[in-house]
Amino acid sequence: MLAIWLNGFLRRRLDLILGSAAGVALAVALLALLGAFLVTSGRSMTARSIAAVPVDWQIQLATGADAKFVIDALGQATAYRKIEPVGYADTAGFTARTGGTVQTTGPGKVLGVDRSYRTDFPEQIRSLIGAGEGVLLAQQTAANLHATVGDSIAIERAGLPPVEVKVDGIVDLPNADSLFQAVGLAPSVAPQAPPDNVVILPLTQWHALFDPLTSMRSAAIETQLHVGLTHDRLPSEPMAAYDSVSRAARNLEARLAGAGIVADNLAARLDAVRGDALYAGILFLFLGMPGALLAILVSHAVAVSGSGRRRWEQSLLRIRGASIAQILRLAALEAGTISITGVALGLCLATLAARLLWQDSLFTGAALPWTAAAALLGAMASMAAVLLPAWAQARSLTVAVASAAIAPGAPPLWRRFRVDLLLLLLSAALFWLMQRQGYQIVLAPEGVPAASVDYYAFASPILLWIALGLISARLLGIALGPGRRLLSWAFHPVAGPLSSLVTAALDRQRNRITRAFTVVLLAMSFATSTAVFDATFRAQARVDAELTNGADVTVTGSAALPAGPLLPQLEGLPGVAAAQPMQHRFAYVGSDLQDLYGIDPTSIGRATRMSGAYFQGGNATATMAALAEIPDGLLVSEETVRDYQLQPGDKINLRLLNVTDHQYRTVPFHFIGIVREFPTAPSDSFLVANAAYVAGQTGSSTAEMVLLRSRIEPARLAHEVEAVLGPASGLRVSDIDSALRLVNSSLTAIDAAGLSEIELGFAVLMLLVAAAIVFIPNLAERRRAFAIMAAVGARLPQIRAFIWSEGLLVFLGGSLAGLLSGLLLAGMLVKLLTGVFDPQPEGLTIPWLYLAVLAVAMFVATLAAAVATQITLRRPIVTALREE
Amino acid sequence: MTSPVVETIDAARIFHRGGRSFEALRAASCRVFLGERIAILGPSGSGKSTLLHLLGGLDRPTSGRVAWPELGTNLDLRPKLIAIVPQSPSLVPWLSTVENVELPALLGGEPRTARHQAMTSLENLGLANLAKRLPQELSGGQAQRVAIARALMGDCKLILADEPTGQIDGATAAALFDALLTHLASRDAALVVATHDPAVAARMGRSWRIDHGVLDTAAATGS
């Protein structure tokens, strides 16, 4: 009997099997891809997060320690790729005699490095001008001394005569913070600022100059070993990698027994990205889980869509004496056929997608369990959708009721108990609680090993999503019931005098219509919220890149080698739409050295975006106008305002370097406002002032930087600028796209982009699945009903009115409701995941192009369902009338 | 001389299915005039429904022709000129009783009077109390009476009923026919009923016999 049933099923209902299997396939494919994505992103997370660590470990040798012993102990503790000795010597200062004046700096550091250091750790020292080896001057030191390549400077040595050296090159130290970190301090101690004055000598020369001091002032002389570890065996997950590296460092220190202390930069970096890694994982939950739920729901909905036909067939079987067990066996056969077909199709689809997206396999390694789980979940959802109703109906419904054309039943439980409203209230309450605690989902305090994630935060958007789906189903029920007149009026342009019958027909097929409507709504809502979140994230990444780079193209120099003098040359380039100079100085606020940016507030906006979000008050135009009006006006950060209890109008004294005597002199300013962000400014405290006033007070109108707004692609303009400047200019040219690539390389950005790629594509497919849900169920019955109408006298356009009205209600209505829901959800997600945004978004960014694609998909789905139905109407009326 | 409402001239209908052909109707020629009451009598599978479908314009003959000299072309026949009661089930399952009955008026562009006409038609057949029920909530006999009420809407000139008493007991069928014939008495519409029930055929003015697709229109006049 099973064979006969299956044979008949495959021969006569193949379209139903394939249609239902398509829904299951979509669900399985999405679940499998989400799992594979989790594995893929996790695998490379550690590598991505430590890519920018220049020196993994800095081992500070104790006085008199044997370097060979330390290196041997290092080899026993862990595997390493490279190791370089670096000498550190304190100096009372440097002196230079240039242009008839003598410049003297404050205390500084003299480093000694081998020639191979720059090969092993290329990110540590960046040449600006002159030679790449020999006596190298840090750019700030060169500015302080007014020295350049070829000048002689004197290095003070406590207890010994100063020594003169000739400057071979001027360099930048991009990682000065870690290079000069105080090794061995307790975590609670505030980080030390790097020295303002640095000279780098060849290691042999350094030893010659400072070894004699070892016995006299051992505290002033240190040796470090800079180590690059082997990363191949690190765990893929940053926290696990952090544990591994930290343990190795502690193991080494135990072996050294006081002969050395390890500054673990690698672990610090892994610790720092803890929050990023956690947010990346959380993004997977926030953006991925609704997709997974939707996939299971679609699988279930597609399987349930055939319930009317199955109920009728099973009633026939019961009339002929089939037992419940026999009915369930036949139902299981159908369910199994659909599940197996669906799972196979889904795995094929997912395999193809995985190869295209990540050149990876779903059936190897850590991805295999996820693939198996996806197959199992999809199969179980569709099997349950067929078997559970069959079992329940066989046990509880009479044959007569079961064989009715329209399914019986009271309103669903959720409607009776107002579950939709309860979920909405619960979601709102949870969101309000999150708002009260400042949307802190990830708590990863600096220096504290443990990180906590507030998983309850997930509940709010998930509950809202479900609630919106149920509320929309309730509203649809109201529209079809008490609101039928209004709906009838709305359908009048399509159905004419038949509009009342059309709405009556839709009401009587409420289950099928509601199912399809809800799938469309949830798919649209899910796609919209993901797309809006992704667009907002990308927009903020763009803002972040704008702030990091300063403008489309930025030419960065230094006090010794400013970019400002090249302004006329740069302005003349055809690709330059606007160019603005900007000073970048350093000023002491109390004992705190902060970056100071000098601008022309009336014209800075020509070359770079001045967003209201950068300033307190939110009005960039007003802030710039205020700065222009007050020559000694100063914009400071919130932290500075707090530290010094500033009020608007308060006088604030800064100490700025004066070029006439190369001394730091007090310059008065007046605090006029708070600046939160500024192009090229660091994330900590900084200052913005009028360039003219700073020039007048410091004796130098030099602009260290030039900001360029580009008419062409920024990368192209950057190349043109580099060509104009030449390779030995010592100036750095950067473009916004490079900065954007860097921003987009964060773990969170990669996860957001990857998830969006998967889910946005599936959302479009799910709209087509909804079309199948509309079209497939009770096909023969609907065909006969339309044939009766044709026999009574309905013309094809009149029958089309029923079909198109159904399509419009499901797809247009569902899409609009889904769009609104998606926007609401996106707003909630952006608030809850506020930690991933830097800077905070001013509002949502709407991806109009993607929404247009969704609208087209919606239209195609409507068209597909309507056309497919109409194609079946081409069957002769008499043939359809003979069908039962 | 009046024209027939509908006539067939050597109309034949062959169905093709799965590579095989089946001749459901063979060269049938017949005429129906206004006011006639005709029963097409024959066993199941004899071709009654096929002939009815051709007469109603639901199907086209494979050979021969069908014409409606009194009514016009095939395009204008339904719902205003010809009403068809298909074999059961013959109601649209998503529409209530009154909605099923008012369907022809709405399709024919008479929305203002559709509901009133439908209720009148239901009342004439004693079915007004079933107006809001769905087809699944009706018995087989009630459903067929509703289908007939639908056919009696408007001023059709030709009413074709396919086994209208197929699911009804004898007494109810008789009552149904009484109501039908009474309603049609004041109208000049022709009524053609396909049936295998001799009792129904006996109440019609003429009977045609059909067997294995062969139509014999020379039959005794009914009582």
Image (cartoon, grey):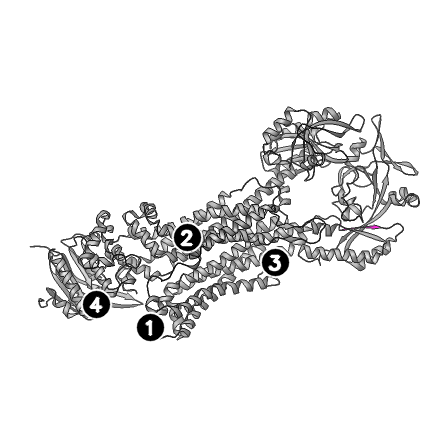
Q: Position of residue A85 (x, y in %)?
A: 83, 49
Q: Circle 2 — which element?
A: helix
User: Marks 4 and 1: same chain?
Assistant: no
Q: Tell me the CA gap for discs 4 and 2.
A: 41 Å
A377 sits left or right of B11 in the view: right
Residue A568 in the image: x percent, y percent? 66, 27
Q: Are marks 4 and 2 in contact (CB under 8 Å)?
A: no
Labels 4 & 1 near each other (Cβ < 8 A): no
Q: Main secondary structure of the magenta part?
A: strand
Subunit ID for the residue under disc 3: A
Looking at the image, is mark 3 or mark 2 nearer the viewer?
Answer: 2
Q: Secondary structure at mark 1?
A: helix
Residue corresponding to mark 1? A319
> Which quadrant of the rendered structure holds the N terminus of chain A?
bottom left
Task: Tell me if residue A193 can be seen.
Answer: yes
> To which residue does mark 2 refer?
A474
Left or right, residue B219 beside residue A273: left
Residue most extreme to the left: B1
Q: Residues within 10 Å of mark 3 (few under 14, many from 20)?
A: some
Q: Quadrant of residue A599?
A: top right
Q: CA distance from mark 3 to mark 2?
A: 39 Å
